[in-house]
């Protein structure tokens, strides 16, 4: 679920594909991007991948997909649906991956990793896919029975904030990779999607029976408050991001009263004390979202019905 201050106004015409063990050499894929043609659906073959998280690397036009299964292999997928393995640290962690973020500024891909009594944040080299750091977040809350390191964001000071959905907590990892508990408060349960706002606060989707969007000041987390969302039955976001216009774009956590799922865009005119819906588009059930360029997004379709499926779909979302 990465708004890492990506420069979305990238001149795609001059993109150079990086050379590494998982880079793509597809001329057709490069041609599509150069012509600004983005497929409505990208179908890729990866048996049992069961992806929950998606992130995009704008330097080589590559998606990365996580894997909620016993094989933690993170896959790299291009616009033609070609698949390579970005990283497979099975022998080191053998745990499932959830939310992912590309941090181009620091040349790393960051992954939420989970397993029985395990809750880690793994940091990989973005060029090689090598696992460079494992940050044990579960050790901060040893009394918990279950952990779900779900989503993360990186702020302008290279500090990471991570949602622990089953722990009802938000973790913080400083720029020296030291972890701590950042926010934990009664009645604030099941934190899911998270973004960093450059004005110095987090927006966190608490997805549960009474879902809410919460604004948490970084310098004063105890002043957290629920964002009032006008004229919209907010059922929580799963993955979400802050786009180049400062609008919040998220994948619905639960269907509406008609059973529909959607990508919703929210705006605020008062620094996120309140918000209102500015755009919406129906999609198939999906877990999270990534942005390619202004008004071009992709979600990963995931309905949890068949975790052994062999083909998976990235669905393009573009608001009218």
Image (spheres, grey):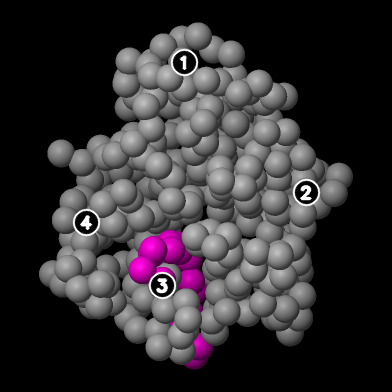
The mark closer to the camera, 1 or 2, is 2
Looking at the picture, tell me which residue is in the foreground, 297 or 124: 124
Q: Residue at x 27, y 40 (%)?
A: 295
Residue 8, picture quadrant = top left
Q: Which residue is mark 3?
A: 201
Give the labeled residue for mark 2: 132
Above or below, comparing residue 99 to residue 231 in the picture? above
Tell me the crowding category of disc 2: few under 14, some 14 to 19, or many 20 or more residues within 10 angstroms, Cα based.
few
Can residue 50 be seen by looking at this rendering? no
The CA span between labels 1 and 4 is: 37 Å
For marks 1 and 3, the one nearer the N-term is 1
Residue named by callout 1: 29
Q: CA distance from mark 4 to mark 2?
A: 45 Å
**Residue 189 counted in the magenta span:** yes
What is the total number of numbered labels drawn onto the structure image? 4
Q: Which residue is mark 4?
A: 258
CA distance for labels 3 and 4: 34 Å
Segment tinted magenta in the rendering? 185-200
- Helix or strand or loop: what does disc 4 sit on? loop
Which callout, 1 or 4, points at the residue further toward the start of the chain? 1
Q: Secondary structure at mark 2?
A: strand
């Amino acid at each position: 679920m990465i708004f890492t201050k990506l420069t979305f106004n990238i001149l795609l015409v001059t993109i150079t594909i990086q050379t590494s063990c998982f880079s793509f050499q597809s001329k057709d894929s490069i041609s599509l991007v150069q012509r600004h043609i983005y497929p409505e659906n990208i179908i890729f073959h990866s048996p049992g991948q069961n992806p929950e998280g998606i992130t995009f690397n704008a330097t080589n036009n590559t998606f990365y997909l996580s894997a909620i299964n016993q094989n933690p292999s993170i896959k790299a997928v291009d616009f033609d649906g070609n698949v390579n393995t970005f990283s497979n640290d099975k022998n080191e962690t053998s745990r499932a991956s959830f939310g992912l973020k590309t941090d181009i500024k620091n040349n790393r891909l960051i992954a939420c990793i989970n397993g029985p009594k395990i809750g880690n944040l793994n940091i990989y080299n973005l060029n090689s896919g090598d696992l460079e750091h494992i940050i044990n977040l579960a050790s901060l809350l040893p009394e918990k029975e279950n952990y779900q390191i779900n989503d993360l964001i990186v702020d302008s000071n290279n500090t990471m904030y991570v949602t622990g959905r089953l722990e009802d907590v938000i973790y913080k990892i400083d720029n020296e990779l030291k972890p701590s508990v950042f926010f934990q408060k009664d009645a604030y349960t099941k934190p899911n999607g998270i973004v960093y706002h450059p004005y110095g606060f987090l927006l966190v989707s608490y997805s549960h029976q009474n879902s809410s969007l919460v604004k948490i000041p970084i310098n004063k987390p105890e002043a957290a408050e629920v964002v009032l969302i006008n004229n919209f039955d907010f059922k929580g976001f799963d993955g979400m991001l802050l786009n180049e216009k400062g609008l919040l774009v998220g994948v619905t956590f639960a269907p509406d009263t008609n059973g529909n799922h959607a990508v919703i865009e929210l705006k605020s005119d008062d620094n996120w004390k309140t918000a209102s819906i500015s755009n919406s588009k129906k999609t198939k059930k999906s877990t999270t979202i990534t942005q390619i360029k202004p008004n071009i997004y992709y979600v990963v379709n995931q309905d949890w019905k068949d975790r052994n499926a062999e083909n998976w779909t990235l669905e393009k979302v573009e608001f009218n």
